[in-house]
Amino acid sequence: MKENADKYLDDLSRKVIGKTSVKSTSMDFTSTVMSQIKAINNSKVTTYVPLISKRIWSLIGFGFAAIVVYVVCFASSSNSSWLNTWNLDTFQSLDLGLNNPLASFDVSQVTMYAIVFLALMLCVQIPVLKYYFNKRMD
């Protein structure tokens, strides 16, 4: 039975192929394909744009430097007992002739922990987001 079905399909396919004519491509087929390839190459390509620009990095660096200068020069020893372990008292004793505009500004310990946690999470999330967007571009 299977041989009979195979023979019928073979005859049918020979008839169908025999009745169809061979189609040829147009004369300008190659030039049309090449022009489409050139159009794809000339299309707008996604360029690399950093997640954090150089201007923002400079602002972050300036802010960090300002915090370090504030802690070293203007922080009182009662609020920053952890500075005593690093022996930075010599920097605090320097008289630069600058007044401290934030002398009455006091940050609670919970707020300090929140700021440190935020900075830590930011340092973790930036590489994760960079990896995610790089994989999405590929």
Image: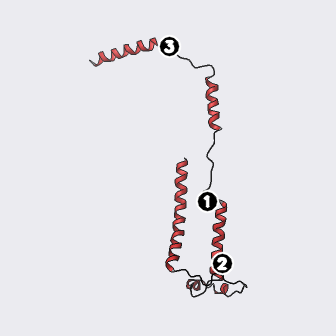
Q: What residue is shown at x 50% (from left), y 13% (from top)?
A: 21
Marks 2/3: CA–CA distance: 86 Å
Query: According to the image, label 1 marks what residue?
Result: 52
Label 3 vs label 1, nearer the camera: 1
Q: Residue 57, percent across and down?
A: 64, 64
Quick one: label 2 or label 1, which is nearer the N terminus?
1
Q: Quadrant of the N terminus?
A: top left
Judged from the image, the secondary structure of the residue bearing numbered disc 3 is: loop
Marks 2/1: CA–CA distance: 24 Å
Q: Residue 122, percent across and down?
A: 54, 65
Quick one: label 3 or label 1, which is nearer the N terminus?
3
Q: How many marks?
A: 3
Judged from the image, the secondary structure of the residue bearing numbered disc 2 is: helix
| Amino acid at pointer 2 | Val
Q: Choose between 8 and 83: the one closer to the eye.
A: 83
Quick one: label 2 or label 3, which is nearer the N terminus?
3
Q: What residue is shown at x 65% (from left), y 73% (from top)?
A: 65
Query: According to the image, label 2 marks what residue?
Result: 69
